[in-house]
Image: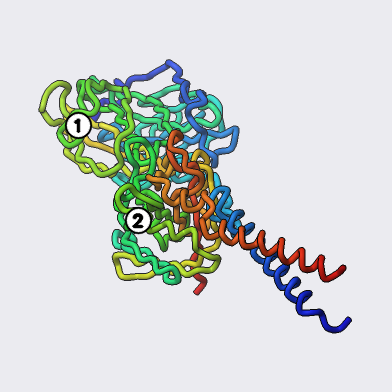
Amino acid sequence: MKHRSPRKRWGFLAAALTVLLMLVVFATERLTDDDGPADFGAPLAPRPTMTSGGPSGSTPQPSTPGAEPSSSPSRPVNASPRSLVIPRLGVEAPVDAVGVAPDGEAEVPDDARRVGWYRFGPAPGAAEGSSVIVGHVDSQTQGLGVLAELSDVEQNDRVEVRAADGATRVYRIASRETVPKEELADSGVFRRDGPPVLTLITCTGPYLKDRGGYQDNLVVTAVPESS
Amino acid sequence: MTPRPIAAAFVLATATVIGATAAAPAVAAPAAAKDDQATVSVFHAVPGLKVDVFANGKELLPDFEPGTLTDPLKLDAGSYDIKVFKDGEGPDGTPAIEKKVDVPAGANATLVAHLTADGKPALNAFVNDLSKVPAGKARLAVRHVAAAPAVDVRAGGTPVFEGLVNPKEVKGEVDAGTVKADVTLAGTDTVAIGPADLDLAEGTNTVVYAWGSADDKNLALKTQTFKDLHSAPHGVPAGETGENAVNSTGLPGWSLALGGLALAGAVVGGRRLFDSQR
């Protein structure tokens, strides 16, 4: 039969629409009903950062009097990041240098419109290691935080970090991964050696008030744009 | 300044075990060291005496000047007969200092030729603590190897370590950053050394030696830094209200509505298909 009856065609259309809607609902549910935004890209390979203490010298060479056997590499002060920009999502957030709170967790700027650069790790643009930028996903007083947008990043999205010295470092989103909070410290996101990456961290996952709130961190990794 | 009488040099026969505590699991062996090796730095803290250092009869450090701290040396684990000679007098003469030192595998230590509190040459091994430092912190160790009485160590004018005597070490973990440090005679405000700016970088162990001689007015500080002892912060508390979770854990209203519509469509469409095939 070459031509379907109008009734039959209507039936096909309804069935097709049904399948489509089912798919939409299913996809929505899948995306949002478990632990938050889906992972994508190759997850960050954890790298143990254990290295030898001090420089290793195999030849007995006395240093000159007064010289230090080792000194901390001086990072140019003006390499400190000042703003984080994700053009496609309209994200533009000022960056504060943050350290460690008395409880041993990383400091996160109180202002959910600002983000924090972990100042003890590498600065964006450093030759090695993971430059970490953290930010609230939501806050008591301000609603959703600027890094709530990490739910919407896609592979290859452009990320810019502008430094105090005026230089802009350009990265491309490579992966997004949900990491249980208790596994974050050992996941390698704070590594100080290995390939240079920019790591953006916020909260995600189920929010359980009696278990400290969010159960997971959302870890988005970006790699330097090849020039 | 009077040169120390070498003939009257103190010869120590007691064996010291480097790193009696280094064998404890709390002290991590440097990953770079081979299993059967130890890492040893040598600090010459006897003022006014150029020396040659011999280990088991072989010259380890020629023409070693006071105030010099070597880079870490890799040594095979084992027992070493360390002899320190006045420049050019070894290895057959009378050593200025002699000591048997046991070097266990995996240890990291600094061997210090220094003066005792009453001004006699001595040799001591200090174990370097290379365990991880908590995030945001720096480890500070102070070693009293000077011909001087008990001292206090102050940071920014506040005593952090008190009553330190030769040849002991005190250590602790402090907030990373630069501090203005000085050394006072214990229990007094009489400054013996300093002040000096100490850059206590995060994730490092900074060892400060107070050395020299109070009588000869050449007390000084020497620092030795061990890097890469940092830890990651315990976590990133980056959410407060659960607002973003509510957005994503509950099914949004529109998807429920679409779901309903889909069901209706399925019923209608299915029935029509079924009807038409009859």
Give percent across and percent down for residue A159. 44, 67
Q: Is residue A159 above or below residue A123?
A: below
Give percent across and percent down for residue A89. 43, 68
Q: Which residue occupies 38% across, 53% down?
A: A135
Q: Nearer the viewer, residue B211 or A142?
A: A142
- In the image, taking residue A80 as reference, residue A47 lies left or right, namely right
Give percent across and percent down for residue A8. 78, 74
- In the image, taking residue A96 as reference, residue A150 lies left or right, namely right
State the SS at label 2.
strand
Q: Is residue B136 above or below residue A94?
A: above
Task: Name the residue furthest bottom.
Answer: A2
Q: Is residue A207 above or below residue B183?
A: below
Tell how many labels.
Answer: 2
Closer mark to the observer between disc 1 and disc 2 = 2
- Residue type at mark 2: give it: Val
The span from disc 1 to disc 2 (Cα, nearest Å) is: 36 Å
Give percent across and percent down for residue A29. 59, 54
- In the image, taking residue B32 as reference, residue A104 lies left or right, namely left
Q: Which residue occupies 61% across, 54% down?
A: A30
For residue B154, the mark is 1
Q: Nearer the viewer, residue B203 or B22?
A: B203
